[in-house]
């Protein structure tokens, strides 16, 4: 059967997709909770104010809140592993989460801690998919099978930078420092 | 086990000059292939806790009745192998009957309807079936090209069971006279795939003296290496 084609989320997606608890992948008071913040910027360097991101990730033990995780569903209390946040007039988003643990990759290899991200906006006929890795995980990142196939000059676009209460990850849709986007 | 990738002929391109907003937003670099590992073979399962009691009936969310033609929109959510996708969250949003969104930034010179928010949610049942009641949306102008009008549509958002199945799409109505000039609809090259976005009027499902009905079946991506599909 032919899959139903994708269409743009339109300018007013926030009517249907804005949830009060949307930005919280974990309960706010979970130990180790952090903020992941950033901006979405277009090819002219202008903010994308009516965009939205969604994240999907493992818990600190590397487990997903999903029955198909063969090791069993995530055990961290209050962990959903999913969050969504619209962007403000400056293109900014912020989601509350925990840093994931390493996740099984290919065979015996582990993937470095990472978060899958979907980007939606007017003008995107399909979501864009990228991954957040963490700049303070150099050993894991060096062995990661996904980063290994990314042009070394572009890998830095996938690294979130640590800050006082979490990490910063900007998403550049187009241009010289364009974020690496993935075909899933 | 991984999920199949969409056929480019049946899927809109990211860069589509006729839709002006893609020009500065579509990446210039090719997408990097991401083989499906555990992060992609799972995905958010969002269920009952997300639904309010009247989320499935957009005509009963306010004290008064909204203006417009009452319709039931219903259908089945399947994967590309024909299997129902049960208990998956479906979110919808749309304009009112006059073609205006209940959003502070929509300044189209059409009336707002105090009895219509245009937001709904439901879950598919065990068989993948869903239904909600709403008002037929209106078309509206936008500034993409001279005299540009969006065909009437309802926005849909679905998750499926795994990250690659995530889908945001739009449902259109049969015989809309505005299809020919709409670059969002026409970004899908294959005419048959494009028609998958057009709902079907279903006379048998109309509720006498109450509502008309449109069927919109949605197919999420299927899995690779499905034995029954091997030649």
Image: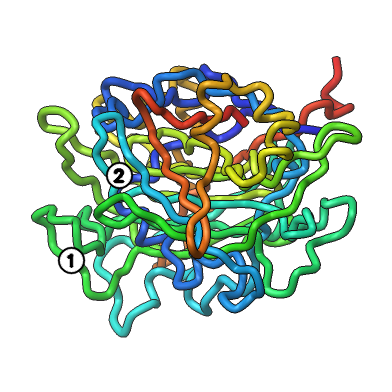
Tell me the residue at 75%/42% (across/down). B41
Tell me the residue at 40%/20% (across/down). B28
Q: Nearer the viewer, residue A75 or A101?
A: A101
Work out whether residue B7 can be spotted: yes
Q: Nearer the viewer, residue A54 or B5?
A: A54
Crowding around mark 1 (Cα neighbors within 10 Å: few <14, some 14 to 19, many 20+) is many
Coordinates of residue A173 in the picture (x, y in percent): 38, 33
Q: CA distance from mark 1 to mark 2?
A: 27 Å
Q: Is residue A45 left or right of residue A170?
A: left
Q: Is residue B108 left or right of residue B93?
A: left
Q: Point out the image quarter for the N terminus of chain A.
A: top right
Displayed quadrant of residue A76: bottom right
Identify the residue under disc 1.
Answer: B112
Q: Chain of mark 1?
A: B
Coordinates of residue A143 in the picture (x, y in percent): 75, 32
Residue B32, relative to residue A105: is it above or below?
Answer: above
């Amino acid at each position: 059967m032919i899959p139903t084609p994708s269409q743009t989320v339109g300018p007013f997606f926030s009517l249907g997709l804005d949830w009060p608890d949307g930005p919280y992948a974990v309960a706010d008071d979970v130990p180790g909770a952090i903020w992941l913040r950033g901006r979405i910027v277009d090819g002219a360097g202008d903010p994308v104010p009516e965009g939205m991101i969604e994240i999907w990730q493992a818990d600190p033990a590397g487990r997903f809140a999903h029955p198909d995780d063969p090791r069993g569903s995530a055990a961290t209390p209050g962990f959903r592993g999913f969050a969504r946040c619209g962007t403000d007039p400056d293109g900014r988003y912020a989601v509350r989460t925990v840093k994931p643990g390493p996740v099984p990759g290919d065979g015996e290899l582990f993937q470095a801690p990472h978060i899958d991200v979907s980007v939606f906006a007017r003008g995107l006929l399909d979501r864009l998919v990228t991954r957040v890795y963490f700049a303070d995980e150099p050993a894991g990142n060096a062995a990661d099978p996904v980063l290994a196939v990314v042009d070394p000059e572009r890998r830095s676009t996938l690294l979130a930078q640590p800050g006082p209460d979490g990490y910063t990850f900007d998403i550049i849709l187009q241009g010289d420092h364009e974020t690496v986007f993935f075909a899933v | 086990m991984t999920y199949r990738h969409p056929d480019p002929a049946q899927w809109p391109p990211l860069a589509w000059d006729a839709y002006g907003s893609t020009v500065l937003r579509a990446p210039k670099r090719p997408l990097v292939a991401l083989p499906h590992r555990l992060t992609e073979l799972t995905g958010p399962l969002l269920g009952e806790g997300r639904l309010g009691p009247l989320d499935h009936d957009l005509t009963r969310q306010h004290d008064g009745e909204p203006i417009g033609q009452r319709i039931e929109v219903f259908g089945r959510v399947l994967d590309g192998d024909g299997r129902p996708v049960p208990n998956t969250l479906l979110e919808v949003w749309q304009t009112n009957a006059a073609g205006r969104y209940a959003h502070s930034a929509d300044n189209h010179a059409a009336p707002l309807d105090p009895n219509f928010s245009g937001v709904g949610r439901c879950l598919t049942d065990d068989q993948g079936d869903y239904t909600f009641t709403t008002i037929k949306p209106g078309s509206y102008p936008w500034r993409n090209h001279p005299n540009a009008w969006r065909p009437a549509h309802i926005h849909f958002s679905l998750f499926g069971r795994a990250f690659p199945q995530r889908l945001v799409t739009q449902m259109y109505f049969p015989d809309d006279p505005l299809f020919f000039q709409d670059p969002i609809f026409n970004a899908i090259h294959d005419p048959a795939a494009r028609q998958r976005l057009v709902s079907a009027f279903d006379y048998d499902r109309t509720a006498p003296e109450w509502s008309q009905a449109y069927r919109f079946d949605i197919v999420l991506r299927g899995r690779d290496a499905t034995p029954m599909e091997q030649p």
